[in-house]
Amino acid sequence: MEAIRGLPQIVRSTVLSSRLAVPRKHYVPSYKMIRRFGDEAVSTSMSSQASPSAFPLTTEEAFTFLERYLDIPKLQLFTEGKSLHFLNRVIKEMDRRIPFTTINYLTERPLSNLKPEDWKDHILSGQGGTCRWINPFTKAFLERLGYTTLQIPGNYPVTDGKRQTHISTLVCNVSHPGSRHLVDPGTRLPPGEAVPLDFETESPEYTPYKERCKFFKHGNDFIRLCIPDSSGGSNAYIMNDSRGAKWETRIEYWLNEQTTWTHFNECFFEVYEKLNVPLPKPYDALVFYGFVNEKKISIVCSDGQIHATFYNTEDRTMEQVMMTKTEMLDFFQNYYPQFSITKLEKACEISKLT
């Protein structure tokens, strides 16, 4: 998110609460609760063991996550089957209920020390994460629900060339045999639904939460997620749509290659920790995208300042403000208490917030 210009004056915590207009202490089920409800989540006749090479999510945990966290009855899956309609509902709820944030990325170093269970716990405890956390979980979760999925690599082309620095998921054979849909809740620009890849050169425009995006095919091997161009056409990764408008590539997906989350982590470590390639802004500091009821909240720290955006999904109005560090910590303590104050303070220190 680029720097926000012309921001109003700083908002006090009481005003933050009135803007959100929801009870404090936003409830998110804990991982312990997921585990406790696990035995009753699915019949014992279904397999509960993840394969050794798969993301360590059991079928019981997946169905409990579906019902207790996404608030979708498992009976609906059994009555609808593995339909596109059901898949879109799942992806929409994941976008709304799993925050996209760099908090754990910044504070849990070195990331190579994290165990697979740690990654899973971040999702099941409501802490979310980036593509490294969310998208491997998404693949395993959809598999446990019965969908056929592929894990594909990607990259941020402007900064990373052809290195694997993004990971995403294809869901196969949903609308018809041979169909492919891209699902990517682990990005700050999720379309909010499964994206069919049967378009010839460009997809329809998606406008989730007032942010425009479009997908383009680039040769036979790549799909590019693009936003309206802000570079004046100087970017080498600019795509032109059928009307002549320019779109700037943010993520490039590799359609004809597969990866695993363990291999992706090795590639990511090679780029950002061993080679010290700088993270693209704003992901080098604290970033948070989440929901409080019908309000989408984004918090982006840049150059020692905290920019916050409140977007109402009902009337599609948006307000941009500046926050103090105290106000930001108050927001997390009241609406996302699953983040400890110690972890938040560490993220603030790394983000050079005072």
Image (cartoon, grey):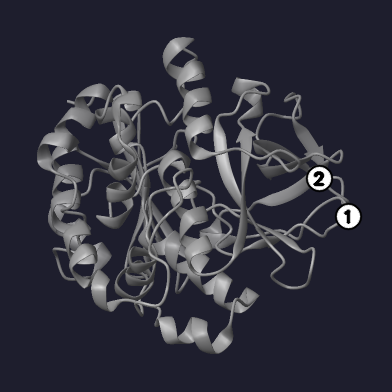
Q: Which residue is found at the position 51% from the left and 65% from the top? A: 91
Left or right of residue 11, residue 149 in this image:
right
User: Can you give x and y, in whole percent of width and height, for residue 160 in the image?
Assistant: 61, 22
Q: Which residue is found at the position 11% from the left and 40% from the top? A: 341
User: Can you give x and y, in whole percent of width and height, for residue 33 in the image?
Assistant: 18, 65
Is 12 or 292 nearer to us in this picture? 292
User: Can you give x and y, in whole percent of width and height, for residue 201 in the image?
Assistant: 86, 50
Q: Which residue is found at the position 67% from the left and 21% from the top? A: 161
User: Is the residue 194 above or below the residue 184 in the image?
Assistant: below
* Farthest-out residue, bottom: 79
Q: Which mark is residue 139?
A: none
Instruction: Say whether marks 1 and 2 touch (CB < 8 Å).
Output: yes
Is 319 or 276 nearer to us in this picture? 276
Badge 2 is on which residue?
217
Give the mark nearest the N terminus, 1 or 2: 1
Q: Residues within 10 Å of mark 2 (few under 14, many from 20)?
A: many
Residue 103 in which image quadrant: top left
Secondary structure found at label 2: strand
User: Is the residue 299 above or below the residue 39 in the image?
Assistant: above
Q: Which mark is residue 200?
A: 1
Q: Which quadrant holds the C terminus?
A: top left
Left or right of residue 321, residue 311 in this image:
right
Residue 348 visible to an observer of this rendering: yes
* Farthest-out residue, top: 275
The residue under label 2 is which amino acid type? Lys
**CA–CA distance in space, label 1 to label 2:** 7 Å
Q: Which residue is found at the position 52% from the left and 54% from the top? A: 139
